Amino acid sequence: MLSKNPNVIIIQELNAPGVCVWAGICSYTIIGPYFHDGNGPKYLKMLEEVKIELVNNDIFRDKRIICIWGVIKDRVYKTPIQNLIHLKRRIEEEFQILNIDYSYLYNATNAVKKCCGAVIEAGGHHFEHLL
């Protein structure tokens, strides 16, 4: 980050410890968050344990749906994070708050419905221009 004042020092931690988070969203609730260490076999085990299907389908990775992490991340990092335990706790707290915002859940899931309709209309071909 640059400052107009060359005498200003901006402290920003680089390579801070982080966590991998997975969460699902439907029109009435959020599934998760689930934390995993990014290790492939452990991630697969976590997915099998929570019975999550279709996670690798591209329609469920639409950029409008991923915005949930942007909302959570902005809220989590409003306060300085002390350590990984504190980070996980803050993420869980913010997911709980967002989980009761039914208008957000409804709007996010309607974006998926719109994408599905566009995929069908495009016959499975490129559909972004239809959105």
Image: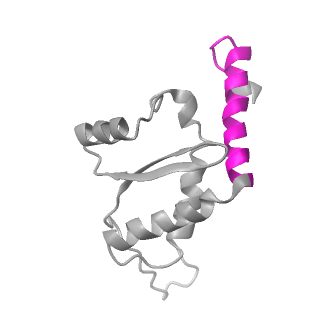
Q: Is residue 65 above or below residue 79?
A: above
Residue 121 colored magenta?
yes
Q: Which residue is drawn at the image coordinates 66% and 34% (left, top)?
A: 112
Q: Position of residue 63 (x, y in %)?
A: 59, 41
**Label tally:** 0
Q: Quadrant of residue 65?
A: top right
Provide residue 123's location: percent of width, then percent of height.
67, 10
Residue 117 left/right relative to 42: right
Q: Nearer the viewer, residue 11 or 48?
A: 48
Image height of 44 relative to 20, above or below: above
Question: Which coloring applies here?
Answer: one colour
Main secondary-structure element of the magenta-colored stretch: helix
Front residue of 67/126: it is 67
* Side (left or right) of 84 relative to 117: left
Residue at (45%, 85%) from the top-left corner? 9
Q: Which residues are magenta?
A: 103-126
* Quadrant location, the C terminus: top right
- In this picture, is 31 found above or below 126? below
| Residue 111 is a magenta residue | yes
Q: Where does residue 78 sit, x and y in percent of width and height?
A: 54, 75
Q: Indicate the quadrant where residue 47 lies.
A: top left
> Residue reaching furthest top?
123
